[in-house]
Image (spheres, rainbow, N blue to C red):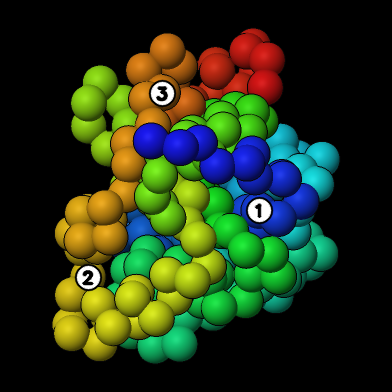
Amino acid sequence: MTARNPIPLTEISLLVLAGGKGSRMGGHDKGLMDIAGKPAIEHLLERFATHPGPLMISANRNLKQYADYGYPVLEDASGNFPGPLAGMLAGLVAAPGRYLLTLPVDAPLVHNDYPARMAAAFSECGSNACVASLNQRIEPVFCLLDATLAPALRDYLERGQRSVNGWLGEIGAVPVDFSDSPQQFINLNVEQDQKKLQPYLTSSPH
């Protein structure tokens, strides 16, 4: 396999996926829930404020609150919360650069080297998509995608498909091993996770 040239981080648009219904959180908007003294999304925006490429937020409610952070806010084309793939499609269409890197708003422990690690792996993988994995299990909403995948994703959604894993399998996304730092995939699924995440955010370096 011939390695491609490294991807410039300036060409990678970072998309924070904050468009879910929060069903397991009693309908609360997880991105705006307090963790260690600030909304979950603020931890990520501060962490990636120095990312040299564009940063965008995918959201379907509380749009003004998200827009107040000063980054473009993308709504799904469909208003029925079809899942993270709809947010990814909006990001692929809107991305100024050639690549889109996604991460969920409910994972405030993601390291600030996440873009560089994914970019390095993408340059070696020989595919137009790669996805983070932990102990040989993929973390499907942590992926780096070539913007040319937008038509394929639109077609997948128009076929009524919603599975992120299914689409990543269909396009041959290559796993990127993050087993050396598993804590960054701890997410905010139930209200008890607020307390579980707090010690990491108050004591560990970004």
Numbered disc 2: secondary structure: loop
Of circles 2 and 1, the one toward us is 1
In this image, 121 relative to 190: left or right?
Answer: right
Position in image of residue 72 (x %, y %): 72, 71
- The answer, for residue 84, to whether it is visible in the render is yes
Can residue 55 be seen here?
no
Q: Helix or strand or loop: what does disc 3 sit on?
A: loop
Q: Which residue is mark 2?
A: 162
In the depicted structure, whether residue 100 falls above or below residue 44:
below
Q: Residues within 10 Å of mark 2 (few under 14, many from 20)?
A: some
Which element carries disc 1, helix, strand or loop? strand
Which labelled disc corresponds to residue 12? 1
Residue at the spot x=55%, y=78% of the render?
93
CA separation in Å, label 2 and label 1:
24 Å
Q: Residue at x 31, y 26 (%)?
A: 134
Pick whichever of labels 2 and 3 is earlier in the sequence: 2
Kind of residue at badge 3: Phe
The mark nearer the N terminus, 3 or 1, is 1
- Total marks drawn? 3
The 10 Å Cα crowd at callout 3, few under 14, some 14 to 19, many 20 or more, is many
Q: Quick check: 199 above or below 52? A: above
Instruction: Estimate the spatial distance between the alpha carbons at disc 2 and disc 3, rounded to whole Å.
Output: 25 Å
Q: Are marks 3 and 1 in contact (CB under 8 Å)?
A: no
- Residue 9: name its quadrant: top right
Please indicate whether residue 20 sits to the left or right of residue 137 in the image: right
Q: 203 or 183, which is in the foreground?
A: 183
Q: Position of residue 68 (x, y in %)?
A: 78, 67
Q: Nearer the viewer, residue 170 or 40?
A: 170
Q: Which quarter of the image is occupied by the N terminus?
A: top left
- Residue drawn at (17%, 82%), measured in percent from left and top? 160
Give neighbour class at mark 1: few <14, some 14-19, many 20+ (Cα, 10 Å): many
Q: Identify the residue under disc 3.
A: 178
